[in-house]
Amino acid sequence: MRALLALLLLAAPLWGGPAELRIEFIDVEGGQATLIVTPAGESMLVDAGFPGHGGRDADRIAAALRRAGVERLDYMLVTHYHADHVGGVPAVAERVPIATFVDYGDYAGGGKRGNELAAAYYAVRSKGKHLVVGPGDRIPLRGVEIDVVAAAGKFLEKPLPEGGGPHPACAAAAVRNELDENGRSVAFLLRYGQFRFADLGDLPSAEELRLVCPENKLGEVDVYLTTHHGVDRSGPPALVQALNPRVAVMNNGARKGGDPGAFRALATAPRLQALWQVHYSLKAGEANAPDRRLANIVEGMCGHSLVLRAQPDGSFTIVNLRTGYREHYPAQPRDRL
Ligand SMILES: [Zn+2]
Ligand SMILES: [Zn+2]
């Protein structure tokens, strides 16, 4: 019995045990690859980075899976059919079994590149279960509640429990409608007890504002993954102020995303305590987060993740795997509660 217990302890994931939510922001150099492991031990990868580069992104994802003790992905969520999101899925499927593929449905765009990416994805998707989601649906990952708020260019109609009510920042919000593949992104909010996390994929500003203007249907979150890698045509101030995050994580690359306008928008969030970035942005200069909150600084010496571990009381810790530096954010009641 004692030997068995010792074995179980050794086999426990390096970061966190079963009673916490773990989110790893994996460096795919300006794409998205976010690994969610729930307290119930289920896993979902949100996007899989780029194809090519000798399997670079899939290798980094495989390393993250090992760190989290995940041997099989329960869900592979593809937010949309751009190369930096869906491109890495076939290479990930070569490295780990995937049970269920989640997306907005078949590729709704056009063009040779998009069709090729979609075809490569369908080839692996056909080997697992397939779940098409729309706004108002819940992705059935055990241990957390994941509400889809947008998909395929459709948007949540009724507010989430934490949302509702007019949003004063909307008057100043400029709305340009540019529904394209980014605008079809699957966007979701995750709830684990009091902890809330928002990932809106690559939604452009006009589509994000449909979720928070004139009514704030989303409500406040603890952690906001900056939409669209921190480009300045996503994540407008009205969206950031509606989510009012305590912490923002930007999944930018050295040269992709990380636009100065995104940093200016984040600075308007009243509660924001800290910004973490997957990369130093060569475009942002002094607006960049301090080095200790940057997972990667030098181009060509990359691949480091940020790991978030959240408790049901809403407290959470973020660890920089490049250095081991960590910050703890204690539980803090939201205004609306
Ligand atoms: Zn993208
Ligand atoms: Zn995109």
Image (spheres, grey):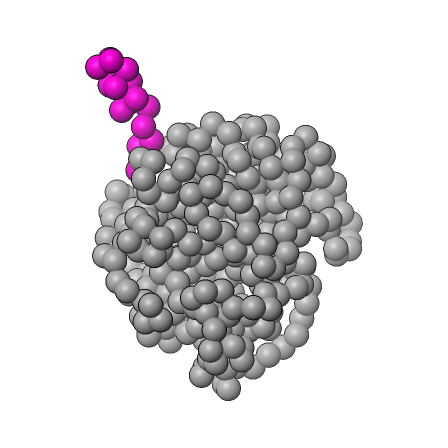
Magenta-drawn stretch contains 98: no
Q: Quadrant of residue 177?
A: bottom right
Q: Which residues are magenta?
A: 1-16
Relative horizontal placement of residue 197, taking residue 128 as reference (left or right): left
Magenta-drawn stretch contains 5: yes
Q: Residue at x 58, y 33 (%)?
A: 99
Q: Indicate the position of residue 66 as horizontal and vertical percent values.
A: 41, 30
Q: Residue at x 48, y 81 (%)?
A: 166
Q: Residue at x 66, y 52 (%)?
A: 104
Q: Is residue 97 above or below residue 2?
A: below
Is residue 334 at least partly visible in the picture? Answer: yes
Q: Looking at the image, which residue sits at the far bottom?
A: 171
Q: Quadrant of residue 179?
A: bottom right
Is residue 60 at least partly visible in the picture? Answer: no
Q: Quadrant of the N terminus?
A: top left
Viewer-nearest residue: 129 or 70: 129
Q: Residue at x 66, y 64 (%)?
A: 154
Q: Indicate the position of residue 136 as horizontal and vertical percent values.
A: 58, 59
Q: Is residue 136 above or below residue 125?
A: below
Q: Indicate the position of residue 278 as horizontal and vertical percent values.
A: 40, 52
Viewer-nearest residue: 134 or 55: 134
Q: Quadrant of the C terminus?
A: bottom left
Q: Is residue 17 above or below residue 102?
A: above
Most common SS among magenta residues: helix
